[in-house]
Amino acid sequence: MKKLISLLLVAMMLFTMAACGANNAKDELKVGFIFLHDEQSTYDKNFIDAAIAACEKMDVTMVQKTQIPESNKCYDAAVELIESDGCDIIFADSFGHENFLIKAAKEYPDVEFCHATGTQAHTADLANFHNAFAHIYQGRYMAGVVAGMKLNEMIANKEITAEEAKMGYVGAFTFAEVMSGYTSFYLGAKSVCPSVTMDVKFTGSWYDEQKEKEAAQALISGGCVLISQHADSMGAPTACETAKVPNVSYNGSTVAACPETFLISSRINWAPYFEYMITQVQNDAAIAADWAGTLENGAVALTELGKNVAEGTAEKLEEVEKGLKDGTINVFDTANFTVGGKKIDSYMADVDTDAKFEKDTEVVTNGIFEESKYRSAPYFDAEIDGITLLDRNYG
Amino acid sequence: MSQKIKKHHEPLIHIVKRDDLLGWQAWGIRLAAIAVGVLLIGVISSLLTGENFFKVYDIMFSGVFGRIFEGKTSMLWKYLQDTAILLCLGLAVAPAFKMKFWNCGAEGQALVGGLAAMFCMITFGGKISEFLLVPIVIAASILAGAIWGVIPAIFKAKWNTNETLFTLMMNYMATQLIAYYVYIVGGGSNVITPVSTGALPVIGNLQYLLNVLIVAALTVAMYVFLRYSKQGYEIAVVGESQNTARYIGINVKKVFLRTMMLSGAVCGVAGMLLVAGTDHSINTNTVGGQGFTAIMVAWLGKFNPFVMALMSGLIIFLRTGAAKVADSNFLNSSFADISVGIVILLLVGCEFFVQYSVRLRRAKKEVEA
């Protein structure tokens, strides 16, 4: 027994020495990523995949820390990435990370801090703290067009009447980020199927598979013939597959698990932003305080179409994309929706983050509600006609 | 009558109750269990990641202590802070578990403690002087924790309700209270922006030093309380046998109430350290499930606060280190929990060898009349 153990130990030591030889200390850029969960969450997976791709493409080292809660642990993680791993850029992916990232940004002025979905960079007055988001409402709008086409097909096939064209939407919280998302989705559907209505249910969690599934099932039994969601688990898509109800997904394709019902999914592709921030640091150039990805720079992305989409969807989608790019289509054109039966010509949104939650900025110009212009994170939170909120959940 | 030689059937292994094991021998067995666990983690990680066996420990160490040999101490402080918070919760549940009152509500008691601190920091911040506000914050969180802890004890004393279920349900209530409070204060953003009013002071530049010192003092105090005080002795007696306690004139219900108040109060301190001493903000995840890990700390430490300190240190080391191994190899983050689980399982399992010794069959023949 003793002999065996000593033999094993010797073998291990030899192995160690061989492995140590391969250690090279290249002085290259290091990017540290702080993720709220890990690749089990579709939200974080979307970031992780993009980070891996971008770091590989730009030939920089990626260091990650997963399962970092929205607390001082985010600050700790940033300090570790800087002091222990020697990172030059720190990126965090969750809204609640922001305050703790700002705390670290103040202490390490030589390190660049980039934060997705945050709202404070334009007012924080810190040269090394930046926010990023994307005009994802454009992607949602296009996904909505696919949904509308599917509804039209169902009406044409006499499966439903025009009045029965009701969609269901599973949202996480009753926040602007979600409201902007479902409204643009609805407007996309409405642009091709004018009689469409929509019911929305909120789960009060970004990731709760059971609740998301139950919400989708409740919507289906309430007469919704098509479901979409803004929450991060597979709950809603799998509920749709079981009930054979078409589903418009989010954060990435769910076609593998839901081959019969998957129509399309929109997502933010973060790789363009990661490449941008790395390039800026490599060139000693400043990173914008607010960066909003678009269809043009590839940040607003759509997956391939599912096999059961309506005929002519691909062509229609191409046409809509062209329109969004050249500005002939504006998602939040006030001519296309009403609030309380009236068209709006002015809207004050709470753009600046402060304790007062005041509506501080006029965001409608020339009849267009300008989403993600005054800061990258969404602020459209009007409740438009045609959409019914079955419940509310502010967390 | 003829004598016959009968072969007595004896099993291959004998399990014999030990009664002569010295304290250091028992700890030897436990240390061996930890060593085997740590070895197993190394083997499993190197199999999963292809990283070599010794490199795994190198990554674990650097994941916990960073570049400590280059004089960078920030990671060491983070380690001490995490250990202190877990230990504080362990100290809170230890008296309850010692009297066999299954307080599974440390999570909720710490959360309401934190909530009380947050409430005072936001409500009174800027309106009264800091010298007054900080003691108010501390007192409020201790009181809130104590109340949250004593409620299940009252029900247990009056109506003999099941305290495990009761304390667990109180956790959900605490979580919902905080969710509601965050909604009120945070508005649409669901995040409370950190507030500095009423926060615990920072000693020097070391933001975690005060937290660590407070928990260190608590550790000593809890040791003295459990070991030398009359109340501490009553806890031990009630834990051994409630009937004995009653027979010798201990008011068991009173001990339940008093101890759970203490347990909740110390949880309140943990919540206060997290909110007023660390985050300066609160959300439903502030305690992060550590109220449950704390139960392991108390049991593994045999309710001895100093041993519990070592156990918290061990658990935090394994969890942080294994998380680093997982992150640097793109493994799933559950790897950290699995690693801690392996060691805890072995530690619990090794108690068998502390209680019993295993003897192999000796070949012998017996003569039977």
Image (spheres, rainbow, N blue to C red):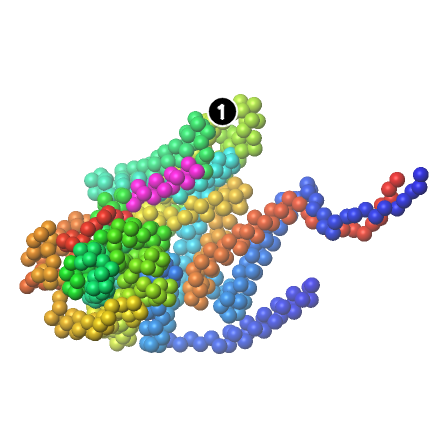
Whether residue B300 sits left or right of residue A251 in the image: it is right
Compared to residue B147, the image places residue B33 above or below, namely below
Q: Chain of mark 1?
A: B
Q: Quadrant of the N terminus of chain A?
A: bottom right
Span highlighted in magenta in the image: B165-179
Whether residue B209 sits left or right of residue B131 in the image: it is right
* Residue B194 in sight here: no
Compared to residue B137, the image places residue A217 above or below, namely below
Seen at 52% across and 25% down, the residue is B250
Determine the image quadrant of residue A148.
bottom left
Q: Amino acid at mark 1?
A: Asn
Whether residue B193 sits left or right of residue B73 in the image: it is left
Which residue lies under the disc numbered 1? B251
Seen at 93% across and 39% down, the residue is B1
Q: Residue B346: percent from the left, percent from the top? A: 57, 52
Residue sitting farthest toward the right: B1
Whether residue B343 sits left or right of residue B178 in the image: it is right
Q: Nearer the viewer, residue B169 or B50?
A: B169
Determine the image quadrant of residue B165.
top left
Q: Nearer the viewer, residue B40 or B361?
A: B361
Seen at 19% across and 71% down, the residue is A316
Seen at 44% across and 41% down, the residue is B104
